[in-house]
Amino acid sequence: MQDNSNDIYEITQIDGVITFKNKNTTIGFIRFNNSGEVEYIFVNPAFRKQGIARKLLKLTKEKIGKDLIPQEPISPLGKKLFNIN
């Protein structure tokens, strides 16, 4: 995640979607259900490799209080994120 004090981030949580934004763009979002299944997770390519996907997963897990599992099909990046071989 960027560590620039001039950046202001907003996190919204609406109907199974958590969105992470700054004043200019959507940085990333996660769509999930109450069973703990992650239906979709996306991070804007310009903001990747900053821990945003892991932050979205953490916020989702805290919100629903369950371990998360990815829905099929799982992309190679998704397998890496969820530590699936």
Image (spheres, rainbow, N blue to C red):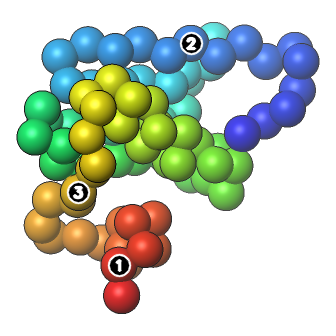
Q: Amino acid at mark 2?
A: Glu
In this rendering, the label closer to the viewer, 1 or 2: 1
Residue at horizontal 87%, vertical 14%?
Answer: 6
Query: 13 or 66: which is nearer to us?
Result: 66
Q: Earlier in the sequence, mark 1 or mark 2?
A: 2
From the image, tell me which residue sits under label 3.
69
Residue 10 placed where, x, y %? 56, 12
Q: Amino acid at mark 1?
A: Ile
Quadrant where the N terminus sits is top right
Q: Earlier in the sequence, mark 2 or mark 3?
A: 2
Residue at horizontal 50%, vertical 47%?
Answer: 53
- Mark linked to residue 84: 1
Residue 58 placed where, x, y %? 47, 39
Q: Relative to 6, is 74 on the left or the right? A: left
Query: 50 or 62: which is nearer to us?
Result: 62
Quadrant where the C terminus sits is bottom left
Task: Report the Cα–Cα distance between label 1 and label 2.
Answer: 30 Å
